[in-house]
Structure formats: structure tokens, C-alpha cells
Image (cartoon, rainbow, N blue to C red):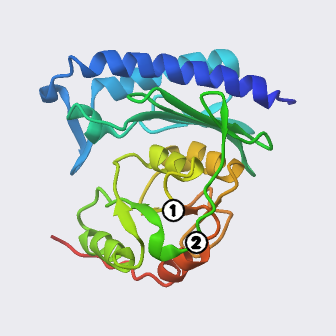
Amino acid sequence: MTLELEKLTAQVCEVARKAGDYLRTEQQKLDRSMVEQKHTHDYVSYVDKCSEKLIVAELSNILNVGFVTEEGTAQHNGEPYWWVVDPLDGTTNYIHGGHPYAVSIALRNIDEVLVGVVYEVAADECFYAWKDGGAWLNGNPIHVNEHNDITQALLGVELPYQTDYKSFGLDLIGHFYGLAGGIRMNGSAAVALCNVASGRWDGWIEKYIGPWDFMAGLLIVREAGGMVTDFKGNEGCLGNNDIVASNGNVHERLIEKTANFSFNFLQI
């Protein structure tokens, strides 16, 4: 199969924006009593599910391949290509009337990610990339920053939903607090990666996330000139759930902290 990746990316951006329009409208009338918990502190609503169905239907019309989706409305059955979809990344922000929240869509094969689109709805920012095509934001090229001083770096981290891993989350912050210039959490892995790609943040570290959380952002960071690895520094991290992304210049310092990280399990 020969794919026209630039054209395909433009079509995916339109799908992401269409889903974003739906999310924006529904946020104004969402009743929190309709929100469910998939796991403790891990929320889902009818909006996530309806957004995913909309995205799956639209993407199937563009390229009918397999799917890996957060809400499980479509499946990957061994197809050589598949879409990876998060219909609403940042659900906790969303249900509280906040932001950021985003639509994240990637297309990949067994070896690599070919297309990545993240649409941050509240700011109307569409980040996108295709393999060897650079990274873009609303039609303008983006690039990671060139900062190389970790003591001045702005890093993103996120606490895992699983409170069983409370000690890990606190230790993660403790490893970087005081080393970096600042630490932030924004509640959306997809947007966090785009913050790195666009030079707003110098790095981002998170564990216990799904492929739909980071797959599109991974390509966007790499096409913007940055690095994405697992906690050990391996670039072949498509199947992992621990991610370190950076501008490249501070990556070694981040890996120094994460490579030997002790993942303590704490029942609370």
C-alpha cells in the first residue's frame, strides 16, 4: 500500500477538528452525574465514547485499516496499518470545565508512526506531523527549543491515575524538583508532548500511559527535532508505557534520573 502521507495528514486534521467541535459543544452541557469511573480517578463519559465513534467512522472512510482506541469501539485484527485514537485526552480537565483537552490520532505500522495529529480544542491549536515531513501547528512549522541547562528547564510530569503507585508519582516529582527550573502538570499527555515539540517545555516524563496517549505526540516531537525514549533511553518505545520526551539537549540528564528509577508499589 502506498500512502500519500501529507494529504492523509490534512484529512486527519479535519477529522480531529470535527471531533473537537463536538467536544466543545458538549462541554457546555455535560452533567457530571453522567460521568463514569473506568478505574479510580480515571473518568469516562458518553462524550468520550461518542467522539470515538465519530472519529472511527470518519477515519474508516479515509483509510479502512485496524484500530487501537482508548474506549474500545473498534479493533486491530492484525492489519498491517492501524489508527491509534484517543477521542478525549484530558477527560478530568474536560468534565470540570477546564483545559487543556485534546483529540489525538496516529497512524502506524508495525515499525513506526507515520502520521500524528493532536488537536487542542480550547486553544484551537492543531499540531500535526507526518514521517519526514516536519512538525506543524496551524500551518506553521514548529521546532523544539535549544535550551541545554537542566537547571533552567521547564519540565512536564504527570501523576498516574493508579493511586497504588502513589510513591512512584511523588518520587518522580522529587527526582526533578530542585534539579529543573520548573515542573508543571497539565492533565493531557498529548498536549504535553506538543508543548515539548513547540518549544514551550524542555521535557516531559510520564509512566503508566496507553499508546493512545502518546502515539501521535511521539511523532510530532521527533519531527520537531526532539527525542522520545522510554525511561531507559531506548528509542524503540512504541509498545512501552513509560515515556521521556525532550528537546534532545537535556535528554541525557533526564535519563540519568529515570534509567534506574525504582518503581515502588504502595497500597493505600
Residue 247: assigned label:
none
Q: Is residue 82 above or below residue 169?
A: above
Q: Dividing the picture into quarters, in which one does residue 126 lie?
A: top right
Q: Residue furthest right?
A: 2
The percent position of residue 247, horizontal first and vertical second, equals: 61, 61
Asked if residue 257 can be seen in this view, the reply is yes
Residue 25 appears left or right of 192: left
Question: Depth check: 162 or 185 in front?
Answer: 185
Residue identified by numbered label 1 = 203
Q: Quadrant of the N terminus?
A: top right
Determine whether 169 is above or below 143 in the image. below
Q: Is residue 64 visible?
A: no
Q: Which residue is mark 2?
A: 250
Residue shown at 29% from the left, 18% from the top: 26
Who's the residue at 59% across and 18% down the image?
Answer: 14
The residue drawn where x is 59% and y is 71% is 148
**Horizontal and vertical percent for residue 74?**
52, 29
Q: Decide which of tag 2 and tag 1 comes sooner along the chain.
A: 1
Q: Residues within 10 Å of mark 2 (few under 14, many from 20)?
A: many
Query: Residue 203 placed where, x, y %?
Result: 51, 62
As drawn, 262 above or below 127: below
Kind of residue sitting beneath label 2 = Val
Q: Residue at x 35, y 20 (%)?
A: 24
Q: Position of residue 204 (x, y in %)?
A: 48, 61
- Which corner quadrant of the image does residue 109 belong to? top right
Looking at the picture, tell me which residue is in the foreground, 68 or 199: 199
Which kind of residue does numbered mark 1 sit on? Gly
Q: Secondary structure at mark 2?
A: loop
Bin the neighbour count of mark 1 within 10 Å (Cα to Cα): few under 14, some 14-19, many 20 and up.
Answer: many
Say left or right for 42 vs 253: left
Tell me, yes or no, whether the two marked residues, 2 and 1, touch with CB atoms within 8 Å. Answer: yes
SS at badge 1? strand
